[in-house]
Image (spheres, rainbow, N blue to C red):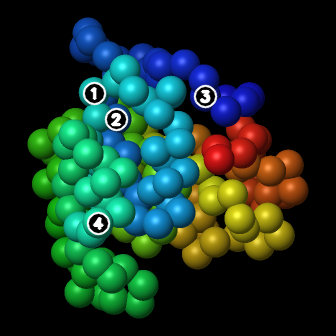
Amino acid sequence: MHSAPATTATFPSDRTGPPRLLLVASTGGHLTQLVALRDWWQNCERSWVTFDNQHASSALAGENIIYAHSPTTRNIPNAVRNAVLAYRTLKDTRPDLVISTGAGVAAPFFAVAHALRIRTMYIEVIDRISSRTLTGRLVYPFSDAFAVQWVEQQRLYPGATVIGPTL
């Protein structure tokens, strides 16, 4: 990707029909950044993984939502629960691409997607310019595509593609 996606996503697939996406994000700014890419994902088949709260309900009204376990920060039991959820969700939905802007909920989904040979794309958050996020560090090895929103972030993640701001 050389710029922020402006049209429908396209991916090679052995099936017909629109690409099938699994969009994974914690609520708050992470979810807001994925929702802001609506022009890119709106014509795709999609499911969302996020937390069960008012922000998700209002931002994703009418969308297929799978609720993850929270909190995720330093919570080993929920990390395990989300890994099991990731396996079940990925086996059931078989997306062409798992895409995330973070945070902690992304890590188990990317690890499981990688193990199942499902393509992944991570977009580093807009507000972390001079240092890497914990989630970015965790999912970088499991990402087929890694995007950053600022040129300054590219030095933190060798091989990342600058897509420009999502917001």
* Disc number placed over residue 54 in the picture, else none: 4
Q: CA distance from mark 3 to mark 2?
A: 14 Å
Q: CA distance from mark 3 to mark 1?
A: 17 Å
Rate crowding at label 1 as few (under 14), some (14 to 19) or many (20 or more) other CA atoms within 10 Å: some
Task: Say which element carries label 3.
Answer: loop
Please identify, in this view, whether the residue under mark 3 or under mark 2 is nearer the observer. Answer: 3
Q: Sequence order check: which comes first, mark 3 or mark 1? A: 3
Please identify, in this view, whether the residue under mark 1 or under mark 4 is nearer the observer. Answer: 4
Q: Which residue is mark 2?
A: 21
Rate crowding at label 2 as few (under 14), some (14 to 19) or many (20 or more) other CA atoms within 10 Å: many
Judge whether residue 96 can be spotted in this image: yes
Q: CB atoms at circles 4 and 2 under 8 Å apart?
A: no
Q: Who's the residue at 34% across and 35% down the image? A: 21
**Along the line of sight, the residue nearer the viewer: 133 or 165:** 165
Question: Which quarter of the rendered picture does the N terminus lie within?
Answer: top right
Residue type (three-letter) at the residue carrying disc 1: Glu
Task: Say which element carries label 1.
Answer: strand
**Along the line of sight, the residue nearer the viewer: 75 or 34:** 34
* Disc number placed over residue 45 in the picture, else none: 1
Q: CB atoms at circles 1 and 2 under 8 Å apart?
A: yes
119 w.r.t. 81: above or below = above
Image x and y of residue 88, in percent: 14, 54
115 w.r.t. 38: above or below = below
Q: Who's the residue at 32% across and 59% down the image? A: 56
Q: Sequence order check: which comes first, mark 1 or mark 2? A: 2
Residue type (three-letter) at the residue carrying disc 4: Gln
